[in-house]
Image: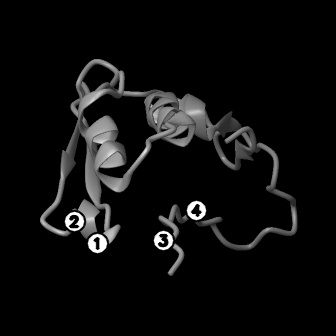
Amino acid sequence: MTISLPWIDKTFDQVIPYIGDFQSVFTQIQKLNPSSASALDNDIKNTLALPSGGAITATSADVPASNDFEYTLSFTITNEVMNFPFAAGAGLTASSRSMPRYTLRRASPAA
């Protein structure tokens, strides 16, 4: 999240200001120390300190008894206009011929 994006010379967290909110929730989940699968499920749904506008809900695939956990983490944010002046930032060289693409993917859970 600290690499500058070409064309605007800003980092991801400067362009998407609520990334820190996601990181905060994931850090809390990593620090949980439940005694059972149902305790983990309860902790995730009920004890996390979510940022303002944040919500976490279990999906229909959330079956703690089978060690299957699936949640939706969502944030309600205000759509603000962000004005970034053009700036040739890191990753853009004179030999670049195409617009760089950034793809964020969620890793699949380990089987």
Crowdedness of circle 3 by 10 Å Cα count: few (<14), some, many (20+)? few
Residue 25 in percent (x, y) is at 44, 34
- Residue type at the position of mark 4: Tyr
Please name the residue that numbered disc 2 is placed on.
63
Instruction: Please tell me how many numbered marks the rendered image carries.
Output: 4
49 shown above or below 90 = above
- Horizontal arrangement in the rendering, residue 60 relative to residue 92 (left or right): left
Please name the residue that numbered disc 1 is placed on.
66
Distance between the alpha carbons at the discs numbered 2 and 3: 15 Å
Mark 3 and 4 residues: CB-CB less than 8 Å, in contact? Answer: no
Q: Residue at x 50, y 29 (%)?
A: 24
Please name the residue that numbered disc 3 is placed on.
109
Mark 2 and 1 residues: CB-CB less than 8 Å, in contact? Answer: yes
Q: Nearer the viewer, mark 2 or mark 4?
A: 2
Q: Image quadrant of residue 73?
A: top left
Residue farthest to the left, as pictured: 60
Distance between the alpha carbons at the discs numbered 2 and 1: 6 Å
Q: Which of the two discs, 2 and 3, labels the residue nearer the N terminus?
A: 2
Crowdedness of circle 2 by 10 Å Cα count: few (<14), some, many (20+)? some
- Res. 102 mark: 4
58 shown above or below 22 = below
Q: Residue at x 33, y 25 (%)?
A: 50
Q: Nearer the viewer, mark 1 or mark 3?
A: 1
Mark 1 and 4 residues: CB-CB less than 8 Å, in contact? Answer: no
Q: Nearer the viewer, mark 1 or mark 4?
A: 1
